[in-house]
Structure formats: C-alpha cells, structure tokens
Amino acid sequence: MYAKALIMLHKTKGIVLRTFPYNDKYIIINMYTEYFGRVSYMTSNSHGKRAKVPHALLQPLSILDMEVEHLNNRDIHRIKEVKSDYPFSQIHCHPVKNAIALFLSEILYRIIQERESNPPLFDYLCRSIKWLDIADAGIANFHLTFLLQLSVYIGIRPNGKSYKPDCFFDLLNGVFTDSIPEHNHYLNKEESLVFERLLRINYENMAVYSFTGQERSAIIRQIIQYYRLHLSDFPQIKSLAVMQSLFSD
C-alpha cells in the first residue's frame, strides 16, 4: 500500500515573487518564505470575494502572513489562510515604485532558489520592501542600493577594502587591482572610482548620491554584469530596459 501524504499546517510569512496561470482554474504563486525558503503554492484563479487568495494580495513584493499546507515529497503546496502582513501605502499606486518592485521581484525570482530558511536574507528583504514603500527621497537610487546590499546576503559582496586611487575594479574576482586584469570583465579607472563610492551606499544616504541618467544606466548594467559573473545561470532580466528608460533623464 502507498503511504498517505502527510499534510502539515504551518504559519509563515512570505514575499510574492511571481504568479502565473497553471490552467483555467488555478494559478501558481512563487514566493520566498520566512521558514521554507523559495516555495510554489497553488491557489484558485477566482477573482470573486470568496477567493482564498485575493488577487490584490499578489502584487510583486507583497508581504503576506500565511497558514500553509506542506505535503511531503511535493513541489507545489497550498495556502490555507492568508492576509497582508504589511499593506502597501505607495508601491501599488506610485508608478516609479511599482516599476522598481517589478524589477526587483524579477531579480529575486531569478536568483533565489534555495528551499530552506535564511532569516538574515528574509529580514533584509522585508526591511527593504518597507523602505521602498515609505521612501520620499533617493528613489532613483533604490534599485542600485538594493542590489549592492543584497550581494552581502547572497555571498558575492565586492571587496571595497581593496580600493586604491587610480585602480581598476575586477568584476570577475570582485576586487580592485592596480593593473588591468587579463580578461575583459573590469571597470576603467573612472568607473571604478564611482563603483567604490557606491559600495558605501545605503537606504539612509542614497538621496545624496547624484547621477545623470546615462551614469545610472551604466551603473545598473555593471551591477547586473557582476551578478551574472558570480551567479550561475543568471538570465537576461526583461524589466531591465524599463528601469533604464525610467531613469534616463
């Protein structure tokens, strides 16, 4: 006889990364959860008032408080009960913040694959999402700040302490060097100076960093290139073009 799947109910918080249709009746929600890491949940595609998971809660980067069913040896689980843990005040109605949320949710969907708890990372993401929601200055630098700070939590932080005047930043090895690396993945002296300055950016001081649209576009391309060099199977980010055009002025 076959063993019956063991259904366990758990309470956890989760961050919405992506939703997509499973069929006409159901959708799949990809989430990064507090206790289980990355998880896929299936729920009804109903838009009515009786929907178990209202679509209003499924905006990118929404933080949810959930009771979930986890079945042993299953890749897709179910949500028993759900409510918003942090109702957005601006992200859903602020065009720029909404675009940033879409971009960052795509980044997280692509790079976070671990199916295990990582409290420091989850806490960082929640704090960052809340900061984006309430920030009133430096918003054009938020995605740069987020990605540079995120590198700490996923283990690929560049070594800013290796900086010296008139040096080059080696994107492949994550260090500043006196001489041009023997490969093409590096920043010139001017770009390296800007990058070293950026390594000190945080949400509290991001408003004092001033860049032209061209400079900001170059910086985000460099950060994405750095991620691609240090993370396997890092794909093209479809929403990157939107971010570059958004802050091009």
Image (tube, rainbow, N blue to C red):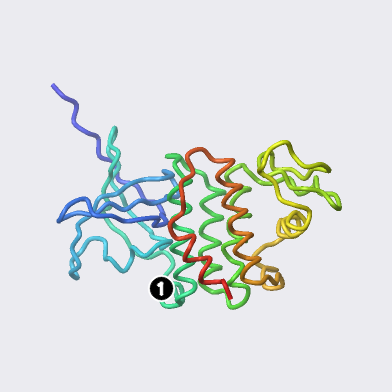
Examine the rendered structure and indicate whether residue 189 appears above or below residue 37: below
Residue 76's x, y, as percent?
28, 43
Q: Is residue 127 left or right of residue 205?
A: left
Amino acid at the residue labelled 1: His
For disc 1, the marked residue is: 92
SS under mark 1? loop
Examine the rendered structure and indicate whether residue 237 appears above or below residue 54: above
Q: The N terminus appears in which quarter of the rendering?
A: top left
Residue 212's x, y, as percent?
66, 72
| Residue in the picture at 36% in, 45% down | 39
Image quarter for residue 217? bottom right
| Residue in the picture at 22% in, 33% down | 5
Furthest-top residue in view? 1
Q: Count residues near mark 1 (Cα–Cα under 10 Å), then give few for <14, some for 14-19, many for 20+.
A: some
Q: The C terminus appears in which quarter of the rendering?
A: bottom right
How many labels were placed on the picture?
Answer: 1
* Camera-side residue of 201 and 180: 180
Residue 185's x, y, as percent?
66, 43
| Residue in the picture at 61% in, 49% down | 151
Examine the rendered structure and indicate whether residue 163 appears above or below residue 247: above
Residue 143's x, y, as percent?
56, 63
| Residue in the picture at 18% in, 63% down | 46
* Camera-side residue of 150 and 86: 150
Furthest-left residue in view? 1
Image quarter for residue 147? bottom right
Q: Is residue 52 left or right of residue 154?
A: left
